[in-house]
Amino acid sequence: MTPPLLTGRHLRKTHGSTPALRGASVELHAGEILAVTGTSGSGKSTLLHCLAGIVRPDSGTVEYAGERLDELPETRLSELRRTEFGVVFQFGQLIPELTAVDNVALPLLITGTARREARERAGDWLERFGVLGQRDLRPGEMSGGQAQCVALARALVTGPKAVFADEPTGALDSLATEQVMTALAHTARASDTAVLLITHDAQVAAYADREVTLRDGVLGAGATEAAR
Ligand SMILES: Nc1ncnc2c1ncn2[C@@H]1O[C@H](COP(=O)(O)OP(=O)(O)OP(=O)(O)O)[C@@H](O)[C@H]1O
């Protein structure tokens, strides 16, 4: 079997005096959708932040494609986040003043793509997520489901190898959840992108290839090859 794209080993992280992770280990393979479930406060978001190089664990290691994220300088980490990772949160965090197409084009502009090409590629991704008709609308003029599809298009437009989605449908009704998850699962598989999907919704976890559960900062069986 090919080695994992991303591996977290024995991750520990404490916020103030609250232990969020207590030795969590997990592997994510290229092209795989992994759902991490768990009750509120079990450490899901903290795990995502450690694996995506957003926060450093207090101890333990995070290895991405042969690089130790927990040891990298901030400059290399932010380069990786811009070029190899995509992130989506519960509330898409689109820029309210920009239209859908300009929101999606933004990561390309930041990495040096010319404006015309960036907007063309943004349009392609809006189409893949079924929201091309909303290209000239601002986030406040769209439904919640449409805005999340735009946020996903923005996360995928740079061709990331890994997408980190933290409760991406947490604010949506079940119909919009289905629209967003169908689009995410389809595009992730078509582009061989790995997805770490944080959720406490069984309807959402059902879209994953594999599901692991966090309990009190530790992952249960199946999170790593050794434990499977
Ligand atoms: N910045 C912070 N400062 C202090 N405590 C924090 C911080 N972030 C998280 N925590 C605490 O760490 C624990 C784990 O939080 P985390 O957000 O990772 O869990 P979660 O499973 O994602 O929860 P939820 O489903 O409610 O989002 C919780 O007890 C939380 O209150």
Image: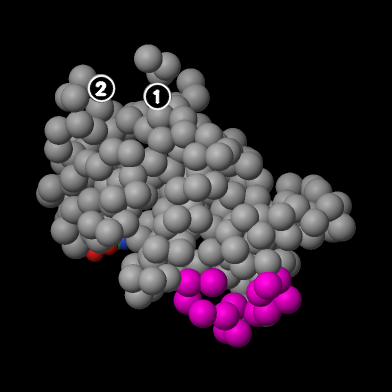
> In this view of the protein, which residue sits in the foreground, 69 or 196?
196
- Can residue 160 be seen from the camera position used here? yes
> In this view of the protein, which residue sits in the foreground, 91 or 58?
91
**Residue for badge 1:** 4
**Residue 228 screen position, x and y as percent:** 19, 25
**Range of the magenta residues?**
133-147
Quarter of the image where ligand 1 sits: bottom left
Dot 1 amino acid type: Pro
> In this view of the protein, which residue sits in the foreground, 58 or 156?
156
* Depicted 45 relative to depicted 51: above or below: below
Seen at 63% across and 42% down, the residue is 159
| Picture quadrant of residue 204 | bottom left
Give the Cα distance between marks 2 and 1. Answer: 9 Å
* Depicted 108 relative to depicted 159: above or below: below
* Depicted 151 relative to depicted 107: above or below: below
Determine the secondary structure under disc 2: helix
**Residue 188 screen position, x and y as percent:** 51, 43
Left or right: residue 87 versus residue 28 is right
Seen at 47% across and 76% down, the residue is 144
- Can residue 89 be seen from the camera position used here? no
Q: Which mark is residue 225?
A: 2
